[in-house]
Amino acid sequence: MKKIILPALMVTATILTSCSSSDSTIGRWFSSKTKRGYTHEYDPGPPKDSNWPKLFAETPNYRAFGSKVIGGRGEKFRWKFGPMWYRGRLGKDEVKVFVIGQEGAQDENVSNRSFTGSTGTKMQKFLNHIGINDSYLFMNTFVYTITGQYSLFGEDRENATKLDQQKRLLWLAQNENSAVVEHRHRLFDYAFETNKDLSLVIGVGTAGKDTAATYANYLDPKSKCSNRKVGNGGCLVKYKGKNVLFIGVPHPGGASPRNGGESAYTRLVSAFDKQAKIVLKAIDDKKIKLSTDKGGKRASSSSRYRYGNASIPHKDFAFGTNWRMGEWGTTSNRRGSHTIQVFSKGGCYNNGAIDPETGRCSQTKTDKISYSNPASLLKSAPKEMAKCDVPYESPKACTENYLVYDEGPGDEFGKVLLSFFEGVEWNAIGVTQHMSFGPNGFYRGRVESAKKLIIADQFSHDDFFSGRALSGEIGQRFQSVLDKSKDDYIIVRTAPVDTLDLDDSQRRAVLFNRDVVDLRKEVLEHVMENASISEIITVGDYAKEVGEDFAKKYKISPKHYSQAQVKKMALNIIPRKDLPAHTRWWMGTSGDRASRAYRKQGSSKVYSGDYYKLYAPYWATRWKSGSLGSEEKSSLEFFQNWYEGQ
């Protein structure tokens, strides 16, 4: 077997070989195991035979309802990049610890998962400390990001005092008659109903602790739980004959340099240490039953908690999510209301310049990077959207489309795909993308049911954010060819990394490198051996060469489409069945929605491998908030009666 050279970021590799029943070469099926688990592991999304998909698809109209309750000018919720519902396990009896926060931020918008930024990695370490590395579920007080702070202190809105605004938001977030709380409780209820061993709830920050207390009292009114109790000794609640401990920790963001500095940090570390000891002692004293996860290591109740970050496992993300998400703290930042930028290990938050002396990100100097903003080609909602749908969420529960999403490539094909990325030292052969991002989205479709194999070049950076191949403008136009046939398909890109910045000779050196050719061939042969392929189609000039050479063995004459041919086709959308769960409607529409940063050198553009940006399309950012549903109207009446009585 040929030696496989792993990139430096990989720690160890377990190489699995499998002899095919045909005369193909031995497949290099392996998966690198790092501190984040195996790289081929991923979250397929909510189990389709559970109630989770429908519960998520029944999210209330946060924008319209929030506006009616809070009033004033502007919108409280940042909605353009949609909601983030959860992170962790959604299967039956897979959860022992339930973590509640306030709301997500930009990392969560990119990953479509909760708690994947700095707060997420810090809570991951807390869970690891108590022996939990897998059996957890994260959710939030709000599924949408809010503008300003939960307390609303320091805000000044038209026609309302700060105190009035605070009372309105607290009602929205914590009153059991609020449509937001009612929906949140249905989510929480289902988590408790389907997990008999769930025995610990952790509230993070003021909102998380408030929400934990609200739910504790909802489960057991006799508990008389409060934010203060949750944040100190905790509340012990009876649920179906067992004890559940509700406890809280401060929000890690409360100890940033601009939020209290060193003294705030000292208090934060002390609070985390205290709460960790309380949890561990409750386990020792058998007040709650919480077994250690397989592979987990539980600290003693007397040991000091070392505050910090722990990377989030790959299995918490959809297949194709860039590997910077959840790696170590925050890895993205907003650039205005409708764009989010991600940065590599070699990049900096908010484009801070690298200090040449220290090699660290400057707090005062900015890296002069630029982007070519993509044009929004779709001017209104795609016809596939139902009237009740909104562009910034996945399909709502008004149709069965909420069950339409791609659960991933499967374990076997996932390993084969990852071997394509991990078996080559890409930077050594000319790729400039930073490898900390991991592979781009380089497949789309389903192997088992495929009758068409599409071999395609990379044409946009959308694949980086969608996690699926051929998802930008060229992919949307080529979709018109695929949609004409009822045959299912599988798309494989000629390389799993970004090569768009390379000239023809550089790109050829990468795409036709011997190791790349061998590993790509194994991916394609896996498809041929596990699908009933009757047609091979190539898209792009490099793909044409790859396809013609590969198809000779199977005596199939590939059909070819050049980029120029595809450019003339009508713009369709990428089907929801091809995209991961919770992909917002505007993803895979409107042409290219992503861009890579560059720096100017004279009249030339030199592309950076450290920065990529995602853009919400114009038509989606101008979407009206819509009207209230019957349940939201009823909830609003409760609010108005409550408010008049204040």
Image (cartoon, helix red, strand yellow):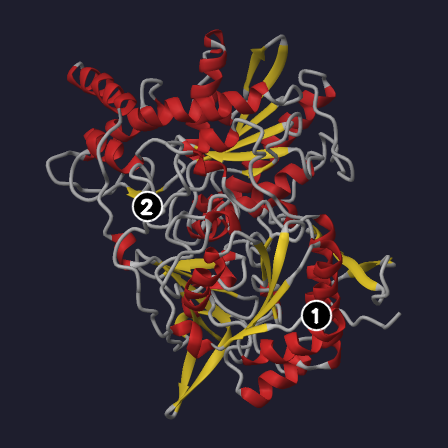
The structure residue drawn at horizontal position 32% and vertical position 51%, both measured from the top left corner, is 382
383 to the left or right of 333: left
Q: Which residue is mark 2?
A: 79
Residue 640 visible (yes or no): yes
Identified by mark 1, the residue type is Arg
On-image quarter of the C terminus: top left
Query: Which mark's residue is nearer the viewer, 2 or 1?
Result: 1
Which residue occupies the foreground of this view, 342 or 230? 342
Above or below for 307 versus 400: below
Secondary structure beneath label 1: helix
On-image quarter of the N terminus: bottom right
**Dot 2 crowding, Cα within 10 Å, few <14, some 14–19, many 20+:** many
Above or below for 467 versus 163: below
Q: Which residue is mark 1?
A: 520
From the top left corner, tell me how far across and down residue 445 is, in percent.
58, 54
Above or below for 53 versus 234: below
Identified by mark 2, the residue type is Trp
The structure residue drawn at horizontal position 66% and vertical position 77%, both measured from the top left corner, is 548
From the top left corner, tell me how far across and down residue 201 is, in percent.
56, 26
Which residue occupies the foreground of this view, 618 or 371? 618
Tell me the quarter of the picture where residue 346 sits.
bottom right
The structure residue drawn at horizontal position 66% and vertical position 29%, both measured from the top left corner, is 94
- Label whose residue precedes the other's in the sequence (2 or 1): 2
Residue 9 visible (yes or no): no
Tell me the quarter of the picture where residue 521 sits.
bottom right
Number of marks in picture? 2
Which residue occupies the foreground of this view, 493 or 154? 493
